[in-house]
Image (cartoon, grey):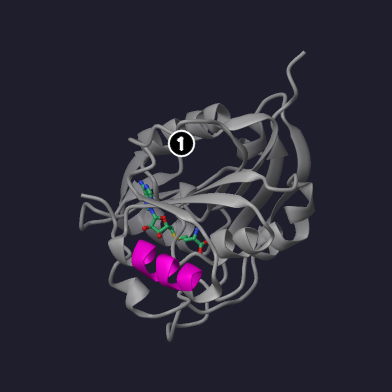
């Protein structure tokens, strides 16, 4: 079993109404009319923002409610999105993309799934294209608690007692090492901003944010 977001998405804008600041800051790297794949599109804040800029966005998610809410927002704003309900690990896209977005997905994967996701990011980003990624690192406040209370499944990886929720934390410098030879347009490891999900408590995460460029082949 894997984690479902359907219940969380009963609250609108669960991850915020606005696009990730990382995407807003670096969207200028995308060519006009860029083909973009948003993995774990959620309620669509990032996909919708890029569609508004004229990108052709494909959004993938396992959550039916996520896709329904994103489609409704796209309709309301007169935007076109291609939305696919599928697991990222079984998706077989017809092309590579100018950019692949991976916001908040890596940290909820098992070690094997996370490794497979990284391979897919390599395969699905065209030469010269960009991966935009946020994930949690071992400085996240939950890391020590999960080390104590959840079952260890790999290096810095844990499974909840319910057997459904995985968490996989990046060690310092690990993400860069997973993209050898790629250019780094942006990279931080620190504490992300304080925020709330819906009416939940205030949270901050140990967050890696990165924009990595697939080298042009010669
Ligand atoms: C933390 S949320 C982030 C949502 C969105 N990227 C954002 O930043 O607002 C992760 C999303 O990934 C989706 N997801 C989780 N595992 C997935 C998988 N294996 N394949 C596709 N989507 C997945 C969840 O349903 C959820 O909508």
- The residue carrying pointer 1 sits among few (fewer than 14), some (14 to 19) or many (20 or more) residues within 10 Å by Cα, namely some
Which quadrant would residue 121 be assigned to in this image?
top right
Would residue 74 be counted in the magenta stretch? yes
Using the image as rendered, state which of residue 144 and residue 68 is in the foreground: 68
Q: Quadrant of residue 10?
A: bottom left
Label 1, secondary structure: give it: helix
Residue 66, given in percent of the width and then of the height, sits at: 37, 64
Q: Is residue 127 visible?
A: yes
Residue beneath the point at 31% across and 67% down = 65
Q: Is residue 99 above or below residue 10?
A: above
Q: In this view, which residue lies farthest toward the top?
A: 218
How far from the left and from the top, in percent, is residue 97?
59, 37
Residue at horizontal 52 percent and vertical 81 percent from the top: 202
* Side (left or right) of 25 relative to 195: right
**Is residue 207 located in the magenta-colored stretch of the structure?**
no
Q: Is residue 26 above or below residue 21?
A: above
Of 100 and 97, nearer the camera is 97
Is residue 137 among what the camera can see? no
Residue 213, how many percent across, how many down? 72, 35
Quarter in which the C terminus is drawn: top right
Where ligand 1 lies, by quadrant? bottom left
Can you identify the residue that label 1 sits on?
117
Residue 23, above or below 117: below
Which residues, given as a range, are shown in magenta? 66-75
Left or right placement of residue 175 versus residue 12 in this view:
right
The vertical placement of 106 against 74, above or below, is above
Q: How many marks?
A: 1
């Amino acid at each position: 079993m894997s984690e479902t977001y359907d219940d969380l998405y009963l609250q609108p804008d669960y991850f915020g109404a606005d696009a990730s600041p990382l995407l807003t800051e670096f969207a200028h790297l995308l060519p006009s009319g860029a083909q973009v794949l948003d993995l774990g599109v959620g309620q669509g804040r990032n996909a919708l923002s890029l569609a508004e800029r004229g990108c052709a966005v494909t959004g993938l998610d396992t959550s039916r409610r996520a896709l329904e809410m994103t489609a409704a927002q796209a309709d309301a704003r007169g935007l076109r999105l291609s939305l696919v309900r599928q697991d990222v690990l079984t998706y077989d896209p017809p092309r590579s993309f100018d950019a692949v977005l991976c916001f908040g997905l890596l940290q909820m994967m098992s070690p094997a799934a996370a490794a497979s996701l990284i391979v897919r990011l390599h395969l699905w980003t065209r030469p010269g294209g960009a991966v935009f990624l946020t994930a949690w690192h071992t400085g996240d406040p939950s890391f020590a608690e999960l080390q104590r209370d959840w079952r260890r499944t790999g290096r810095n990886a844990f499974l909840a007692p319910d057997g459904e929720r995985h968490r996989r934390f990046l060690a310092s410098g690990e993400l860069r090492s997973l993209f050898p030879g790629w250019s780094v347009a942006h990279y931080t490891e620190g504490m992300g901003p304080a925020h709330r999900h819906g009416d939940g408590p205030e949270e901050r995460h140990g967050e890696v944010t990165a924009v990595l460029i697939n080298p042009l082949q010669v």
